[in-house]
Image (tube, rainbow, N blue to C red):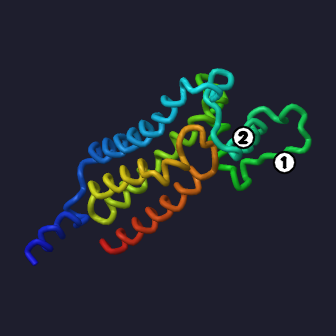
Amino acid sequence: IHTINRYRTYLNPKTDHPSRWLLISLIFVAIGAGITVRFIWDINMQDTPGTKWLDELMLTTNDGYLYATRAKMITEGAIHGNSTMQYASMFSADGALLFFTWLVEKIPAFSFETIILHTSTVISSLIVIPIILIGRSIGSTWLGFFAAIITVVGRAYLDRTRAGYFDTDTFSLLAPILLLYLLVRTISIQRTE
């Protein structure tokens, strides 16, 4: 029983609130880990023949080209006069992906090809934020940090969110975790009142 009580203090929300700077540092370390692991594929494919177009690595899925074409329609209008392509809207099922691409495309430092190649690398790494905050809400920021690292570098998540995987999976996995955080946070606030 003494051991259980000792570990309870580690999971007590009142005792585990490291400084905001430490929390922000843990979030940036976890995001950095996610981006770094996803760039390993990028580095490995640089010298592989047939994987580049316009000096940029090509996308790895057929869906990626569909979403890239829709994103191009949002940023530039029609695609080569192709009237059979379904009109793209930022309010459609893939709207978050299209909106993010449109927004980043406004930054002149990045080409469209670079944006569609690395969107999943950056967005998928942001899943660590709600996971760390869930850990903080239930009483252990460090537990949330380790859970975030395991999630962001996990094989199943990594396969669907690596560089070149321009798909809606990055947002469809981030949204439920964010909603879960909001639910846990609401419950933890109600318990403390």
Which dot, 2 or 1, sits closer to the camera? 2
Task: State left or right for residue 24 relative to residue 97.
Answer: left
> At numbered mark 1, what does the secondary structure look like: helix, strand or loop?
loop
Residue at the spot x=48%, y=29% of the render?
A: 43
- Marks 2 and 1, how far apart at CA: 14 Å
Q: Which amino acid lies under the numbered mark 1 shown in the image of this protein? A: Gln
Mark 1 surroundings within 10 Å by alpha-carbon count, few (fewer than 14), some (14 through 19), many (20 or more)? few
Task: State left or right for residue 82 relative to residue 158.
Answer: right
Residue 98 percent location from the top left of the image? 68, 44
Residue 125's place in the image compared with 139, above or below, is above
Residue at the spot x=75%, y=35% of the render?
A: 72
Pick the residue in front: 3 or 91: 3
Task: Looking at the image, tell me whether mark 2 or mark 1 is earlier in sequence order.
Answer: 2
Residue 53 percent location from the top left of the image? 68, 25
- Judged from this view, the residue extending furthest toward the bottom is 1
Disc number for residue 65 = 2
Mark 2 surroundings within 10 Å by alpha-carbon count, few (fewer than 14), some (14 through 19), many (20 or more)? some
Task: State left or right for residue 175 relative to residue 6.
Answer: right
Residue 92 percent location from the top left of the image? 74, 54
Residue at the spot x=65%, y=29% of the render?
A: 113
- Classify the position of the C terminus by image quarter: bottom left
Pick the residue in front: 61 or 85: 61
- Classify the position of the N terminus by image quarter: bottom left
Residue 29 percent location from the top left of the image? 34, 41
Task: State left or right for residue 19 relative to residue 55.
Answer: left
Write down the quadrant of residue 15 in the picture.
bottom left
Disc number for residue 86 = 1
Q: Which amino acid lies under the numbered mark 2 shown in the image of this protein? A: Tyr
